[in-house]
Each structure stands twice: as structure tokens, then as C-alpha cells.
Image: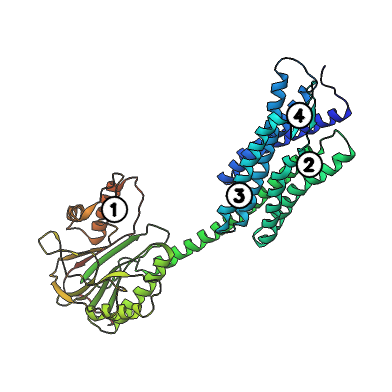
Amino acid sequence: MSFSLDMSNLINVMFIAAGIGICGMSILHVNSGMHIRVEVKKYFQVFFGLIIIYITMHLTRMMMENHLEPGVATGIRVVTFIEFLVSGFMIYLLSLLILFVANPGKYGKTINIVFLIILLIHTLALLIAQFTGFYYYFDEMNVYHRGPGYAMSNVMHILMLCQNIFLLVRYRDKFNRRLASALWFYMLAPLAAIFIQMAFQGIQFIIIATVIAAAYLYFEIIRIQTERYEDQQKETTRLDTELTMATRIQAETLPNIFPAFPERDDFNIYASMNPAKEVGGDFYDFFLIDNDHLGIVMADVSGKGVPAALFMMVSKILVQNYAMMGKSPKEVLESVNRQICANNPEEMFVTVWFGSLDLSSGKLVAANAGHEYPVLKKPGGSFELVKDKHGLVIGGMDGVRYSQYELQMDPGAKLFLYTDGVPEATNAENELFGTDRMVEALRIMENDSPKDILSVVDASVADFVREAPQFDDLTMLCLEYRGPEKGPVVGEKE
């Protein structure tokens, strides 16, 4: 006996060939998808793979019927078992997709366990049916026949289908309208095909219905994924534009025109900031409090990015405002701390070193709120760390009292301020640059201008870090005190 290619079988073969082709092309398409999430790719690889196995087993069973060669009886039973088993995994995969989108919270794990139990029972029942002919059996010509309990073989599918319908209805607000339509179509199309098959005996409309419904479901999910990707790209572009603007705005808020005070010859100052992100939390500042006092600030806000940059702006304005009121450095820090603690819901903080330099005498009065040690070079000497007394960070606790101290800067003295991004710069071996290397770098050109000194330190850090990523903002300031100016005083006419 051989396979009879009558009209119904011919149509079935065409349906199966079309189904295998559609599923195969879908797998190729999902594998080549540039913007498809990995988990979506894996899902549809398995999903369409199971459909190919299902319809291939169906075709193989058709081809083996009416054959009496040795081994055919065993082979046709194995093929049919796989066909029925895979159909269960197909409905289980659909159930997982619906369960994932519905996300019923604490009930999700329980529902999945129920699904797995139903799938296990389905598998065990199929194994038992192999020896009882309860679901199906084959006559002496190896022709497939439904058994007395054939309807029971669909119980698992019906239970999962009912659960899926419940999830779709109960959590309908979580489903994209197009996705919900595709899921309903995937569940209902095979049912409709079964009824159609009753009128056309022998034609497996369920195969082509399953494939078309699966392809439609895939198409809608990929379209949704693509639209989300495009929306994300637009949002990313918008954020990049805003970050670029924020970077420019932040840079403009810091003194960045040098020489900063070309009309004065009693001091020279230079500063730089390289943020780890587009915008950073470090900041420096310098300003004339009056004609005879220079205010100098170096600070580091906790965190990075836009939140730190906003906090930085507030802190910078407060420090300068209180300094311009004529307050001493300790009073400035206490006032800023009180103001920030009064409204700091995110509990951010900032380390601040603030000093006021008397330009006529060289006396520097400073206060430190948890910031790095300053580095001082006296005339004729070398750069050395000044281990001043640290107070608590600004924003750490209300009512903190700060102490201040004095340093004498004679003509030729230089002061170097920095944030922790310098000593904590890390290379690929996870080794810190450290304060010792920083001081050594400062001494290389310690008799040169502040700008040249900062350039050497920056180059030393870059040479040490090399290809390792920058994790922290890199901010530095160098002040050279030259002594009482001999030129015109600010505000006076020449």
C-alpha cells in the first residue's frame, strides 16, 4: 500500500508545506531582527519550532498510513505521540505569553505551576494512551482512528484556553489593543477551523489556521516592539539634546574665561572640570567678594548626572550669596548647610571647601565641610598637603558648627584644590591614582603658571588611567598669589 494523494490529502500537503514555509521564514526573520529583544527572539524561535514539529509530524503520519513495512507500526505511534505532545506545549507557550503580559502579581507563579501540572498530566495520559488505545489507535493497516476517549485528549487545551480567556478579560487594561486582538485570533481561529473541518472531512484546516494565527500574532508583537524601539530612539534623541543643553548651561555657570581677571596682577587663577557624565556634581567657583577679598570654592555633590547637577547649581548660588554678604567662611558653610537641610527630601549632600583670600596681606581664611585636603606651595618650597580639620558634609545634619583656619600665602605661593575624582581615578588594574601621585604631578612644573600645572596633573591622571572608564568628575583649581597689585584697583578709573 502507498500514500494516497487524493484531493483532501493534496490540500493537506499544501497546507503543511505552506505552514512549514511560513514558520521557517518567521524564524529567519526573528533571528535577523536588529531591534527585537533577546527574550522575544528566543520565545518565537521555540514557538515556531514547535509548530513546525507539530505539522511535520502530522504530515509524517499521513505518509506512513497504509504502509506495512517492518517498523512502521512503531514509527507511526511515536510520530503521533510527538504530534499530540507538541500540541500541548504549543498551548502552554501561548499561556506563558498571556501570563507574562497580564502579570497578575503574586498569583502569576501559582498560575504557572497549575499550567505545568496540567501539562504533566497531559504527557502522562498520552503515554498511557499509547498502550490502551483510549485516545487513538491504529488498525492492522496502520490507519489512524480516534479512540473512545479522544475528547479527553483536548481537556488540557480547554483548561488552559479557559484560563487564558480569564487572564485576557481580567487584565485587559494591560494588553495592547492590537496584541489582544492577535491573541484572541490565535485562540479562536483553530476552534473555528475545527468546525469547518466537520463539513470537509479529511481536510486539516486547523493546521493552516494555527500557522496563520501564529504568524499574525508574531507580526503584531514585532510591530509593537519596533514601534517601542522607535519611540525609545526618539526619547533618547530628545534626552541627548537636553543633556547637551544641560552640559552647555552647566559649563556657562562656572567661571570659564581665562585669564579671569585680566585687569589684576596680584593673583592668577585657573580651573577645569571634566564631568564623568554629560553633566556632573562637582563645581568650582571664584569671585571677588570686594576689591580686596577673593572667594574660592571647591565642592563635590553626592551622586552623578542631572540630579547632582541641579543640586550643584543650588549649592553654588547659596555659597556665593552668603559669601557676598560678608560672612566668614565658617558662617558661610553654616548658613548654606542650614538652608539645604531645610529642604532636602532626596537627602543629598555636598562636600565644600571655601576660602577667603585677603589680597593685600595674603591671609587665607578657610573652612572645610568634608572635602579633600588642599595642597599648598610656599614660595621657594614644594607642594604639600594641608591636613586641615574636616567638618560634616553640607546637607548631612542641621545645626552643624564649622571651624575655620588661616593660611599665610606670601607672594609666589600657590594653592591647589581638587575633588576626589583626581586621587580616586582608577586604572584597569583597579589601582587608585592616589594623593601621593597627585602631589608628585603637581611638583613637576610647580614653578609654572596655574594653567600649566593643571595640564600636567590632567595628563598624569590620563596616562595612569589609560583606557579605563572615568567613573567620577575630575575638577581642579590652582591659585597663584603674587602679592599686592601695583595696577589699578577694580572699580577705579585709570
Q: Earlier in the sequence, mark 3 or mark 4?
A: 3
Q: Earlier in the sequence, mark 3 or mark 1?
A: 3
Q: Earlier in the sequence, mark 4 or mark 2?
A: 4
Spatial CA span between label 3 and label 4? 29 Å
Q: Which mark is residue 209?
A: 2
Label 3: state its secondary structure. Answer: helix
Spatial CA span between label 3 and label 2? 27 Å
In the rendered image, residue 25, in percent from the top left (x then y), is placed at: 69, 35
Spatial CA span between label 4 and label 2? 26 Å
Q: Are marks 3 and 1 in contact (CB under 8 Å)?
A: no
Name the image quarter holding residue 262: bottom left
Please name the residue that numbered disc 1 is placed on: 425
Write the residue at 51% across / 59% down: 240
**Mark 3 neighbour density, 10 Å: few (under 14) some (14–19) many (20 or more):** few
Asked whether, in this view, residue 131 is left or right of residue 345, the answer is right
Label 2: state its secondary structure. Answer: helix
Q: Is residue 494 visible?
A: no
Spatial CA span between label 1 and label 4? 75 Å
Q: How many numbered marks have been drawn onto this rendered protein structure?
A: 4
Name the mark nearer the viewer: 2 or 1: 2
Asked whether, in this view, residue 17 is left or right of residue 174, the answer is right
**Mark 4 neighbour density, 10 Å: few (under 14) some (14–19) many (20 or more):** many
Please name the residue that numbered disc 3 is placed on: 114
In the rendered image, residue 127, in percent from the top left (x then y), is placed at: 65, 33
Please name the residue that numbered disc 4 is placed on: 137
